[in-house]
Image (tube, helix red, strand yellow):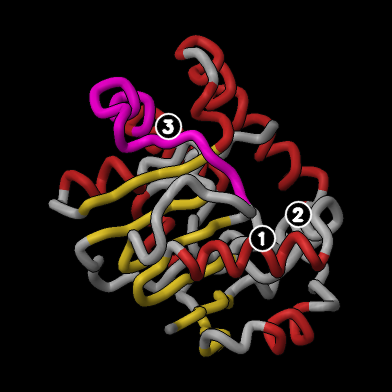
Amino acid sequence: MLVTSRSYAEYEAMFDLTELPASVLDCCAGGSGFTAEAAARGVDAIAVDPVYDLSTPDLVDAVRRGLPAGAAIVDEHAASFVWNWYGDPARKDEMRIEAADRFLQDVSSAPERYVHGSLPELPFEDQRFDLVLCSHLLFTWAEKYDRAWHLAALRELVRVSRSEVRVFPLVQQGAGEPVAYLPELLAELTEVTATIRQVPYEFQVDADKMLVLSR
């Protein structure tokens, strides 16, 4: 179980966020600091992840193990990553450690913001959030979750969104292979408008686009 801790700044770049609406869901959030920072800015921010049913010591351990585990994936596929956004590995590690600390502080002080759940069935009412963000789950793990799962997951994200869903990235983890069935998958989502937008973030080579689903 890889629990990654990404910072608010990374979310801003990955999802091309200029300002946040009144309510935001981060799915599946892992140990990221986004929800804590968004809440501090007055946003009704909720994170959902299957790891939130772990005991506090086990969750802390999973978050702390996430940094070296994520770095190992980068090291294994070094040619598939670029450092233009971070500058160097040390800066990335610094941001991830700070994000992990922010998350662990917030999940302790405001546990109601961190909800146990997983796709493709989320424990929220229809149109609960103005904006739904999904980072490094869909498409990233396309070798593990098939096309049918992805379609169900995307429809569930749309269900709990009042306005917009943003998904990043659109390539598989590691070497960054494209997802062959993405065009056909989007064609099935007739209930929303699907667009692919460039974002000001690239870590995996060519992983600089997000999927936007709008009502």
SS assignment at label 2: loop
Mark seen at residue 138 = 1
Measuring from the top left, give residue 108's x and y in whole percent: 31, 21
**Residue displayed at 34% across by 70% down:** 17
Per the rendered image, the range of residues in magenta is 103-119
Mark 2: amino acid:
Trp
The answer to whether residue 107 is seen in the rendering is yes
Q: Are marks 1 and 2 in contact (CB under 8 Å)?
A: yes
Label count reads 3
Q: Is residue 158 magenta?
A: no
Q: Position of residue 36 (x, y in %)?
A: 28, 40
> Among all residues in the image, which is located at the extreme front?
125
Task: Tell me the quarter of the picture where residue 194 sits.
Answer: bottom right
Which disc number belongs to residue 117? none
Residue at the image point whose x is 67% and y is 71% from the top: 170
**Label placed on residue 100:** 3
| Residue at screen point 50% across, 13% down | 55
Q: Pointers 2 and 3 in contact (CB under 8 A)?
A: no
Alpha-carbon distance for marks 1 and 3? 22 Å
Q: Which mark is residue 141?
A: 2
Q: Is residue 40 left or right of residue 133?
A: left
Above or below, 110 against 89 in this view is: above
Q: Are marks 1 and 3 in contact (CB under 8 Å)?
A: no
Q: Marks 1 and 2, how far apart in space?
A: 6 Å
Say whether disc 1 or disc 3 marks the residue closer to the N-terminus: 3
Can you name the residue that lies furthest to the top here? 57
Q: Pick the residue in front: 156 or 211.
A: 156
Counting other residues with Cα less than 10 Å from the Cα at mark 1, is it few (<14), some (14-19), or many (20 or more)?
A: many
Amino acid tagged 3: Ala
121 versus 104 height, above or below? below
Does the magenta portion include 117? yes
